[in-house]
Image (spheres, rainbow, N blue to C red):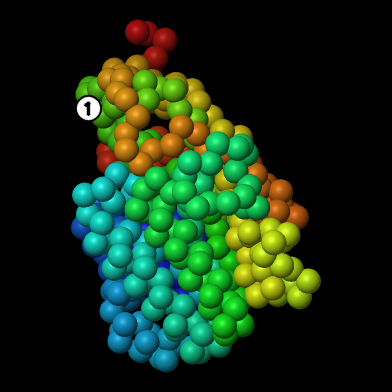
Amino acid sequence: MRFLVTGVAGFIGSAVAQRLCHMGHEVVGIDNFNSYYDVKLKQARVRHIAHPALLVLDCDLADREAIARLFLTHRFERVIHLAAQAGVRYSLDNPMAYADSNLIGHLTILEGCRRHQVEHLVYASSSSVYGLNRKQPFSTRDSVDHPVSLYAATKKANELMAHTYAHLYGLPTTGLRFFTVYGPWGRPDMALFRFTEAILAGQPIEVYNHGDMRRDFTYIDDIVEGVVRIQDVVPAGQPDWNAEEGSAASSSAPYRVYNIGHGQPVKLMDFIAALENALGRQASKEFLPMQPGDVYATFAETEDLFEVTGFRSQVGIEQGVQQFVDWYLGYYGQPAKANIAAR
């Protein structure tokens, strides 16, 4: 089939596009290659795919005319929409970037899909939408009406917009709430990348909430597996569903939302210990209070995704962190790890 993958130069987008190409699909990938983080890393991800079935275009989601032409020219059968302005803390200082990319950009994709009869739109939501929820594990059946960052609010808005298009136009949409994705080719603004960079440079790492945090870290290969499986599960409306008694993750319209996580939250200090072991170096730690927009813990309930795909995350923290470190040392040419037992 012919796919559109947005955010093709991004961490998840590049991995998904590569997998689709290897499965025999034709992929058009778009990205605006913005400078939120190192553009050279984004370009390197695209070069890493190196597949004749991939066409990469420099295109901004907020450019309505360009997106309209894109859909008219290529006639996509399915769309995997992963592009967004990411980052919780960045949204505190640069809110308008989130309006352009996450709201207007999401709407241009919805419009393209409905005007050209795309058979399934899969899009990235986020575990951030759970906000002030304290009931764990986080379930898609629960309310997500109290976000604690603008980033989270835009992702909740994406789900609402998708439901509207599913209801009005019969556009099948599936939202995926990603839980703390990590691994090779990851984003430099995320903890694993920043910690690794600092430890190798002999600098302290910033540990928020004095290390008392838990995250449902999910390895990139597991994320990709979930995405490629769910794109084949085209949602249908449920005629007997009603808003009073039905799950918030489904609808009478062809609309679904799933968590996609490992399902086993890890203490932040255990995550750091796994990184220290992989690097063979002890981290100097600067313990800081909780930051605005952060949450204490994330924990995905993933049974719904398992029921429709038969897939559960496989990669544990020790293996996943080691894979990231091996990539990082190879990509940036850092010296081989020291012998941690010699300290």
**What crowding class fits label 1: few (fewer than 14 Cα within 10 Å), some (14-19), or many (20 or more)?**
few
Which residue is disc 1 drawn over? Answer: 201
Left or right: 38 in relation to 237 = left
- The residue at 36%/53% (across/down) is 151
Identified at 34% across, 72% down, the residue is: 104
> Can residue 53 be seen by looking at this rendering?
no
151 in relation to 102, above or below: above
**Res. 205 image quadrant:** top left
From the viewer's side, name the closer residue of 44 and 243.
243
Residue 178: where, in percent of width, then height?
51, 51
Instruction: Tell which of 154 and 87 is nearer to you.
Output: 154
State left or right for residue 10 relative to residue 314. Answer: left
Q: Secondary structure at mark 1?
A: loop
x, y (%) of residue 6? 41, 69
Instruction: Identify the image quadrant of residue 293.
Output: top left
Q: Is residue 245 above or below residue 65?
A: above
Q: With respect to residue 141, does 89 lie above or below? A: above
Q: Quadrant of the C terminus?
A: top left
In the rendered image, the quadrant that contains the N terminus is bottom right
- Residue 264 lies, with reference to residue 143, above or below; the image says above
Tell me if residue 343 can be seen: yes
Q: Name the residue at 42% across, 91% down.
A: 72
Q: Residue at x 29, y 68 (%)?
A: 100
Specify the amino acid type for callout 1: Ala
